[in-house]
Image (spheres, rainbow, N blue to C red):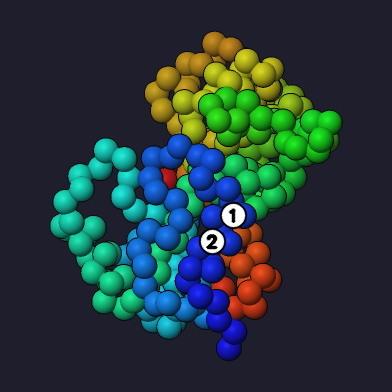
Amino acid sequence: MNQVSTQQLADWLDATLQAQRFRDYCPNGLQVEGKSAVRHIITGVTATQALLETAIERGADAILVHHGWFWKNEDPCVRGPKRKRLSLALRHDLNIFAYHLPLDAHPVLGNNAQLARVLGFQPERDEHGNPVTCGPDGLVWLGRCEPAKTLDELGNSICNALQRRPLLVGNTQQAIRRIAWCTGGAQSMMQAAVDAGADAYLTGEASEPTFHLARETGTAFIGAGHHATERYGVQALGQAVADEFGIKVEFVDIDNPI
């Protein structure tokens, strides 16, 4: 079976995702060092105990996720669930790779790019072929629904694609042509979508002010699920790793209704 050194894999991931370009809420890259060589990777959305246990059962050398550990402002004490997760990783010599904003933003492998592929959105492009974005750090993408759909029709299409019925706020018969989106918990970025003239804004989660902003601006809001919208970037990244190094990579979906 093919293998790659842990350091070579870390360097390739960092370079591919341009991890050093981002000021993030957590460290990006190799968060916990394990075995010196990697033959088998389990990918997933979040580095939960269940994902770790699956990786151990399947004999993996590493996990690669979007939501890793050591978040800004969290309690740094290693106890409770944090202790159990870390203990599992160290006891079984598992490498833990995690990429947050770098994986959201990548123009091909990223969560926004991959969600557009899954939902059939057509991203707008600038003269250089780069996606047109707005909002903090350019994390909100802009694109088109082609053909245009009513909000209700778009909601049904999203439900079919993601296997989860989204929250819709707005006139269900409103035509959606131009759409803005940012996967995960980006409800606070909706104003950027409004300012950009989008007919609708899609993200994973909703908060109380989101409802009022949608109603008062006429920009529809779609809450499609944090986990549901962020399953696809890590799968694309895992496939890229498999193609680059010829090692075994498996995606495991530990479902989360949030």
How would you rate the neighbour count of disc 2 (Cα within 10 Å): few for under 14, some for 14-19, many for 20 or more? few
- Residue 71 found in image quarter: top left
How would you rate the neighbour count of disc 1 (Cα within 10 Å): few for under 14, some for 14-19, many for 20 or more? few
Percent x, y of residue 155: 63, 38
Residue at the top extreme of this rendering: 216
Q: Are marks 2 and 1 in contact (CB under 8 Å)?
A: yes
Mark 1 residue element:
helix
Front one among 31 and 48: 31
Does residue 39 sit above or below 164 in this rendering? below
Disc 2 residue type?
Asp
Q: Is residue 159 visible?
A: no
Q: Is residue 98 visible?
A: yes
Mark 2 residue element:
helix
- Image quadrant occupied by the N terminus: bottom right
Which residue in the protein does label 1 denote? 15
Does residue 94 sit above or below 30 in this rendering? below
- Residue 124 found in image quarter: top right
Does residue 147 sit above or below 6 in this rendering? above
Does residue 11 sit above or below 205 in this rendering? below
Position of 223 compared to 158: left or right? Answer: left
Q: Residue at x 65, y 33 (%)?
A: 141
Front one among 152 and 6: 6
Front one among 30 and 94: 30
Q: Residue at x 47, y 71 (%)?
A: 6
